[in-house]
Amino acid sequence: MDLGFAQFGALALALGALAFMMGGLVKGVIGLGLPMVAVPVLASVMDPKVAVAMTAVPVLTSNIWIVGTSGRIPELLARYWTMLLALAVCSFVGAQFFVKMDARIASIVVGIGIASVCIAQAFPIKAKVNARHEVWLGPVIGALAGLGGGITNFFAPLLVAYMLALRVEKDLFVFSMSLFFIVGGAPLFGSLAIYRILDLDVLAVSAAAAVMAIIGLQLGATLRRIIPQATFQKVLLFALFLIGLNLIRRGIF
């Protein structure tokens, strides 16, 4: 399957470095958003499936580090195991649609995904879910988030909304989201590898991207103390929304 990755050469490497540094910076400022920034920027100049594949190492390593150092893995697995199972299975199912899309349709799908994320993030979550409903609601949310995330690469919106509605404390929120991203992302990246979209060349660039993401993460932590988070997030969401619309345009015209 010729995805045209090699034709970008130095441009792809330079843009990838910038995209992942910016994604890490955003994550350092607001705590989320590495794929949300990196994927649409890269997808503007290359096949969106390759753009998603390039996030594999930064996404998995950063979240594995967070969960692995949390000391709360048994607690997380005991609470969310049914949700995680649904998330993993449906992520794999959704990924089968994504990997078989042509570049134009994938561009539209990623564009709609990023635009939807921006719209969802623009409205605060005020709903509240009682913890006793987790038994049945968790697997439903996991299935829907997995299916949507497998198709678009954006798992966060529904999962964030659900966790905010549960009113979990901030540390548990961070640890839980990282675990969700690992369990949802692994089937997606695995499918990309099976179809040779995530090949050795892309994997090497992805590993280098992880370094750039960490640099951006440190810069973001510094900026968080200088720039009001609310202002930064509004500007970011507006810019990403425009990028999402441009991806949709590229897929249609």
Image: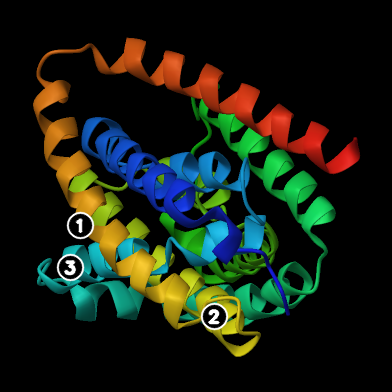
Residue 146 placement: quadrant: bottom right
How many angstroms separate mark 3 from mark 2 (CA)? 19 Å
Q: Which residue is depicted at the point 34% across and 46% down?
A: 20
Residue 153 seen anywhere in this rendered image of the structure: yes
How many angstroms separate mark 1 from mark 3 (CA)? 14 Å
Mark number for residue 211? 1
Q: Residues within 10 Å of mark 3 (few under 14, many from 20)?
A: few
13, above or below 5, in the image: above
Most extreme residue toward the bottom, as rendered?
Answer: 194
Mark number for residue 65? 3
Residue 67 placement: quadrant: bottom left
Helix, strand or loop under label 2:
helix
How many angstroms separate mark 1 from mark 2 (CA)? 23 Å
Q: Amino acid at mark 2?
A: Pro
Helix, strand or loop under label 1:
helix
Mark number for residue 99? none
Most extreme residue toward the right, as rendered?
Answer: 253
Name the image quarter holding the C terminus. Answer: top right
Residue for badge 2: 187
Residue 218 placement: quadrant: top left
